[in-house]
Amino acid sequence: MSASTKLSTSVKALCYLATDSKPKNSTDIAKVTGINASKLRKLLSMLGKSGIVKSDSGMLGGFSLARKPSEIHLQEIYCAIEDRKAFYLNVNDDNLKENSSSKKINYFFLDLFSDIQVEIEKKMTDITLQSIIDNIK
């Protein structure tokens, strides 16, 4: 699953959990959001480890938000489900000469992607789950 798919899938599930405070099981969340239940459980587990959702076991158990939607930021969600940055560049330049054009191009893109990453993270920190919910209403 790509990063953008994981993020949108996670946000769909979190928006559904925000509808009320009662825990919801993964089967119900999957039905409402159209997300595969096994992929959903994996994402909810990662979100749980980051303190975004909590899970209760038992007959009436399920997943619920651990905090208010206004306290959950898009960047936090992204970091919970991804192990690499949005603009990741894998540059293996061990075999390139020190001042070669190829090596300089690699450094150019590393710097560029680093700058873009900072801007993306700043923008995503400014977006809360609540603002997404308000925007889609």
Image: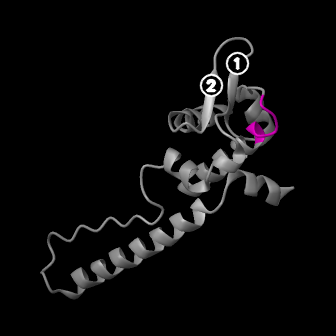
> Image point 72% across, 25% down: which residue?
25
**Which span of residues is magenta-colored?**
16-21
Q: Secondary structure at mark 2?
A: strand
User: What's under tag 2, amino acid-wise?
Assistant: Ser
Q: Position of residue 35 (x, y in %)?
A: 70, 40
Q: Is residue 85 above or below residue 117?
A: above
The residue lying at 12 percent from left, 80 percent from top is 97
Magenta: main secondary structure: loop
Q: What whole-number distance in Å separates the C-alpha atoms at marks 2 and 1?
A: 7 Å
Q: How was the colour assigned to the protein in this rendering?
A: one colour
Is 103 or 48 nearer to us in this picture?
A: 48
Residue 15: x, y in percent?
Answer: 75, 45
Tell me if residue 122 comes above or below residue 39 in the rendering: below
At 65% from the left edge and 38% from the top edge, which residue is drawn? 67
Quadrant of res 51? top right
Q: Are marks 2 and 1 in contact (CB under 8 Å)?
A: yes
* Residue named by callout 2: 55
Looking at the rendered image, the quarter that the C terminus falls into is: bottom right
Residue 61 numbered mark, or none = 1
Q: Is residue 2 rendered to the left or right of residue 131?
A: left
Residue 121 shows in the view: yes
Q: Amino acid at mark 1?
A: Gly
Say if residue 2 shows up in the picture: no
Seen in the picture, residue 74 relative to 98 is either above or below; the reply is above
Q: Please state which of residues 68 and 44 is positioned toward the viewer in this rendering.
A: 68
Q: Quadrant of residue 112?
A: bottom left
Secondary structure category for the residue under label 1: loop
User: Percent from the top left, x then y, of residue 104?
Assistant: 25, 84
Other-residue count near label 1 (Cα within 10 Å), few / some / many at <14 / 14–19 / ≥20: few
